[in-house]
Image (spheres, rainbow, N blue to C red):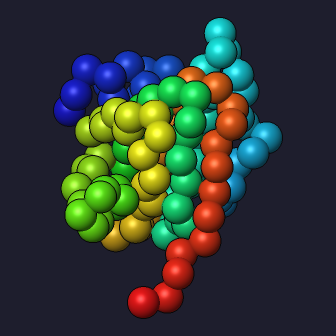
Amino acid sequence: MGLFLKLLKRLHLVQASLPSQPLFDLFKIYRGVYCGAIAMHKNTNWEMHPDGDETLTLLSGLIHLVFEEADGERTIVLKAGESKVIPAGIWHRQIVVESGELLFMTFGDTTKHRPLLDA
């Protein structure tokens, strides 16, 4: 188990179950960074953060992160205990493979959203 996940367990952040998605009341801005936690049980629409990078840390479950790139979509797997930095300006979404809990830290609070389009 990673050191970060051990620390979270010690602080009782992992043991307590989070309410269902979304958790807007738990979102706070700290020193210009938008921080929060969310119970991931359904796929998300596209989102993008123009003001800064976003760091995602999956506490439990399994999700696929999908990035929109010039030549198409790219998908990476995010497992429990892993983190990924998403650069500012990159459209991305999450596909929930196994429900879990996700921490996020995003510089600024100007997230843009757009719906999925059916193929």
8 versus 95 height, above or below: above
* Residue 83 falls in image quadrant: top left
Residue farthest to the bottom, as pictured:
119
Could you tell whether 90 is left or right of 6 in the image? right
Residue drawn at (51%, 36%), measured in percent from left and top? 104
Q: Residue 68 versus residue 40: which sits nearer the camera?
A: 68
The C terminus lies in which quarter of the figure?
bottom left
Q: Residue 91 versus residue 21: which sits nearer the camera?
A: 91
Q: Residue 90 versus residue 61: which sits nearer the camera?
A: 90
Question: Residue 18, how many percent across, how many down?
Answer: 61, 48
Q: Residue 14 versus residue 30: which sits nearer the camera?
A: 30
Residue drawn at (64%, 26%), measured in percent from left and top? 108
7 versus 102 height, above or below: above
Residue farthest to the right, as pictured:
25
Residue drawn at (38%, 38%), measured in percent from left and top? 86
110 versus 113 height, above or below: above
Question: Residue 81, how many percent across, how many down?
Answer: 28, 38
Number of marks in the rendered image: 0
Question: Residue 75, how many percent across, how many down?
Answer: 25, 61
- Res 42 seen here: no
The N terminus lies in which quarter of the figure?
top left
Residue drawn at (72%, 27%), measured in percent from left and top? 28
Residue farthest to the front, as pictured:
70
- Res 70 seen here: yes
Could you tell whether 114 is left or right of 82 in the image? right
Question: Residue 15, how many percent across, how many down?
Answer: 49, 39
110 versus 91 height, above or below: above
* Residue 69 falls in image quadrant: bottom left
Could you tell whether 55 is left or right of 65 in the image? right
